Image: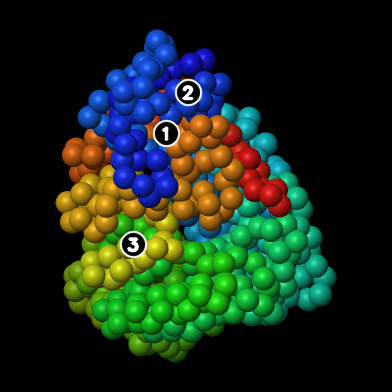
Amino acid sequence: MEILLSNGLIVDGTGGPPTAGSILVRDRKIAAVIPAGAESPSLPAIDCRGFIVAPGFIDVHSHSDYEVIAGLPNKVLQGVTTEIVGNCSYSLFPMGDRANLSQLGSIYADTPDLAMTTAGDYFSALESVRPLLNVAALTGHSALRAYAMGMDRRPPSAAEHDQMERLLDRSLNDGSIGFSTGLNLMPCSFAEFPELVALCRVLKRHRAYYTTHMRDYKFRVVEAVREAIRLAEESGSPVQLSHVQVVGKKCWQHLDTILELVDAAAARGVDIGMDAYPYLAGTCSMVQLLPEWCQSGGLAGLLERLESPPLRDRIARETEEYMSNTWADIVVSRVGRFSAEALQGKSVEEIAQARGAVACETAVDLLREHAGVVDIISFNSREENLRKVLTHPLTSVCTDGHVGSGLNHPRTFGTYPTFLGRYVRDLGWMPLEEAIVKTSAQPARRFQLQGRGTIAAGNWADLVVFDAAAITTSSDYAKPDAPPEGIRLVMVNGEIVVQEGNLTGARPGVALRHTPSGAR
Ligand SMILES: [Zn+2]
């Protein structure tokens, strides 16, 4: 099949200025980039006059592990053509005891039992449904650890460690692109440095990647960045710092220090990168706010401790002491056990006031009342910090998005229109050609996605056509799932998946299997 995307303004991902021209797509690939004025073949054409033609967006940090199997359109509608799933220590493989997994977070809670052991099983499931877009997959440390040793807060035995290494090695052989941690998420948080270095050394043999949701994004964020860099240096694996930000007003000043650490590491040859989503709030489980010791044994252990009044008081007090923002900044987005829509969208402060209670105690009570399943949207950052992170040359743009039950974060539906509309066009934080490096070329380069991320003859025809003047979204914290506006066309592997905001029915996505020389 041949098709011409004619007369667009091409932003090719190299960082160079936009150029007028047409793109010839043949057999799933870009056959030629034809400059304006040169003769074009007479073929069926899509007129792109007045619109930007860019390489499809690559979401380097996604939690759509199951959504890509279920075929949800929220990413491809934004112009995403490739997602890297399996982040923050959570992957759908190895899938062990459901009782353990379902407490890890909504990516498991909302997912049916798929009985997967390695990345090979995941890719088979993905290919059997023919995904909308391309998917690469990290192997999550929490999944490995829960599989090998449950929710215990202790170092692994030699046999348990061996099992984690073997499973990681098998997944990497099957084409997993690397290994992810979420070091303040249980049970990954129970891991100490030697366990992590040993697992990262497995990556080196496969020339695979380490991505890390770090140990802390608050008072100890500087230490956490040091730990991530040291891990890369001692294991020899590349490192990607996930969703870089500093949480809470009390800690905002640490951002400059961590960016200096990243620059210094890069200068001495550490293969380091960062990603960030263009929002000031994050989302996570309320459990993440609690001290790590009280999570030993998983949710069952936590709930047992919450039944003891002295322990409950201590947990509430230590949680309060470690708050870097306020309870008015923490909004309940999902509660697990009962239908509790009355709580959804309310801050912990508001809920506490209505109950005539103290906020930190209310937070702990909510967890107790809802079997430990309370998700929150936390207003964390400020625009000055967001600008410093997004404009940093080592930062790629990501969604960090997941479609769960309850109130979702708008990043899941509106990351790319928000980044390109609000921050690039309206606030002028960077030129469009630099923005497209961050959405497409840099993620592809970083994770060695062969033949993707730039517009060049011979590359896969992953493309997005959008109206730079109109790209936007009305998606917000109150109504997150509003669709993007201004995206005219999305093409994956040469097939049109989205036209004028609607799915065409094409499902041309593939599993991108990592090999030591790149993913293809
Ligand atoms: Zn994370």
Q: Quadrant of residue 43?
A: top left
For the residue marked with disc 2, what is the amino acid? Answer: Val
Which residue carries the number 3 mark? 390
**Gap between marks 3 and 2, in whole Å?**
32 Å
Q: Is residue 13 visible?
A: yes
Q: Residues within 10 Å of mark 1 (few under 14, many from 20)?
A: many
The spot of residue 396 in percent (x, y) is: 42, 57
Give the percent coordinates (x, y) of residue 286. Answer: 40, 68
* Circle 3: element type: helix
Residue at 46% of width from left, 48% of height from top?
A: 441
* Mark nearer the viewer, 3 or 2: 2
Q: Please identify, in this view, whether the residue under mark 1 or under mark 2 is nearer the observer.
A: 2
Query: Which label was assigned to residue 25?
Result: 2
Tell me which label, 3 or 1, sits earlier in the chain. 3
Mark 3–mark 2 CB contact (< 8 Å)? no
In the rendered structure, are the residues bearing label 1 and label 2 in contact, judged by CB atoms less than 8 Å apart?
yes
Q: Is residue 468 left or right of residue 45?
A: left
The residue wearing badge 1 is 463
Q: Which quadrant of the rendered structure holds the C terminus?
A: top right
Label located before the other in sequence (1 or 2)? 2
Q: At x 30% / y 69%, what residue is drawn?
A: 388
Residue 455, image quadrant: top left
Percent across and percent down for residue 101 are: 59, 58
